[in-house]
Amino acid sequence: MTQTSRHPLTWVPSLYLAMGLPNVMVGVVAAIIYKNLGVSNEDIALYTSQMYLPWVLKPLWAPLLETYRSKRFWVIGMEFAMAAALGLVALCLPLADFFRLSLAFFWIVGFASATQDTCADGVFMTTVSKTDQARYSGLQGMCWNLGAVIASGLLVSLTGWLHNHMGLSWVQCWVIVVALAAAAMALFGLYHLRVLPPGWPSHLHGQGLAGGLKATAEAWVTFFQKPQIWMMLAVIFFYRFGEGFIEKFGPLFLLDGAAAGGLGLDNEALGHINGTVGTLSFIAGAFLGGFFVARRTLPRSFFTLALVLNIPHLTYFYLAQTLPADTATIAVVVALEKFGFGMGSVGHMLYMMQQIAPGPFRMAHYAMATGVMALTKWGTGSVSGLLWNAVGHHYSSFFGWVLVFSVPPVLLAWLAPFPQDGREDTAAAGNEAPVGAH
């Protein structure tokens, strides 16, 4: 069996696991590390949110990647780069200047992860037919989220176990766990050397820097020439607007003690909730979302998926109001939010992939769409600390505003345009793969 004919099940799960893990290490786990090491909520929200910028800026260099080597080359190269950078994060945590140094290395992880995301999505979109994209969307979303849950659940739980049962300091715990994450990325790189297909080459391949710069300009021009593009970008930007605030402050709320208005969980409990109950909820939601879209089509299911993602934001408002002490109750309530996030995210991903990306610059245009999604996370994360100060450090008021911010996504999903007619997008400008290439 050649690389280009390998069945998607041999590489799609590992590819999206390898995308989710470093993304959440940078965006979520870094915040928990700094919380354990004594950094304030405001500084955590501000500085870790800036690490979303590589995903915002990746459209600036995405077209250049089309001109050199293969998509497979960039994916595997970035996985090894992330392994090295995470190793350096682990090494600098015991140092006095750990905050500044670790932020710098997390930035490197972020740029490598954003580049990997761009090319990995390119491999998927140019190797798997549109029909199979819908078929595997649940698996794709599940594995990305599973990678995220491994990082924010199992690895965080391990630090709690090491701290509570082995008596290690938080610094020692995180050195071990971040080193394990680095080793995982190296193993992904080794596995993908064997199984990952190269992706269909772009018509820009081999044209060098001049061709890449020209293509970059053309990609931006053609992107904004797409029908109803501004409305589609508004849909993409606001779809997970409320979720952005929960992603940044949800773990801090769960970890903060009762005196600060939080639930007072330790790392071990937080990790178990995210890594066991959260994992099952993600899997159920993502698979149900993929099945739902496959049966009803994306245009007919998109509004429902937006509701499923945003309505469960009520869970954190409920937790902040009632402050339950029972870990099982907290786990069930958080699981409802995880289920909605897993199911609703399928609509977000497929909308970008099937409505915004199609055309001769498919990989670059999808990178631009996901860059807008990252802009949401950067913006909500950056202002979440300001909102936290504005509500007087009261979590119930903070999550009350999150409910308000969850209304525009639903309204825009109702109005979302669908200019693509759903037909198989074949060989646009020589940038597509033959359908069924597995």
Image (cartoon, rainbow, N blue to C red):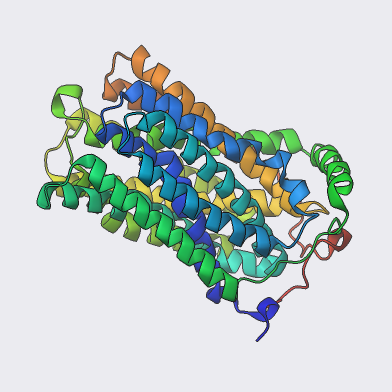
From this view, report whether residue 297 is shown above or below residue 62: below
Tell which of 414 and 406 is nearer to you: 406
Q: Residue at x 36, y 35 (%)?
A: 31
Q: Quadrant of residue 182?
A: bottom left
Number of marks? 0
Is the N terminus in the top left, top right, bottom left or bottom right quadrant?
bottom right
Is residue 347 shown to the viewer in this render? yes
From this view, report whether residue 220 is shown above or below residue 294: above
Tell which of 320 and 366 is nearer to you: 366
Q: Quadrant of residue 259?
A: top left
Tell which of 369 and 138 is nearer to you: 369
> Residue 318 location, x and y as percent?
26, 34
Is residue 356 shown to the viewer in this render? no
Is the C terminus in the top left, top right, bottom left or bottom right quadrant?
bottom right
Tell which of 175 and 277 is nearer to you: 175
> Residue 145 location, x and y as percent?
44, 55
The reply, left or right, for residue 19 in relation to residue 325 is: right
> Residue 329 location, x and y as percent?
17, 46
- In this view, the residue farthest toward the bottom is 1
Q: Residue at x 58, y 76 (%)?
A: 194
The reply, left or right, for residue 202 in relation to residue 378 is: right
Q: Residue at x 19, y 48 (%)?
A: 160
Q: Residue at x 82, y 61 (%)?
A: 431
> Residue 383 location, x and y as percent?
46, 21
The reply, left or right, for residue 150 in relation to residue 296 is: left
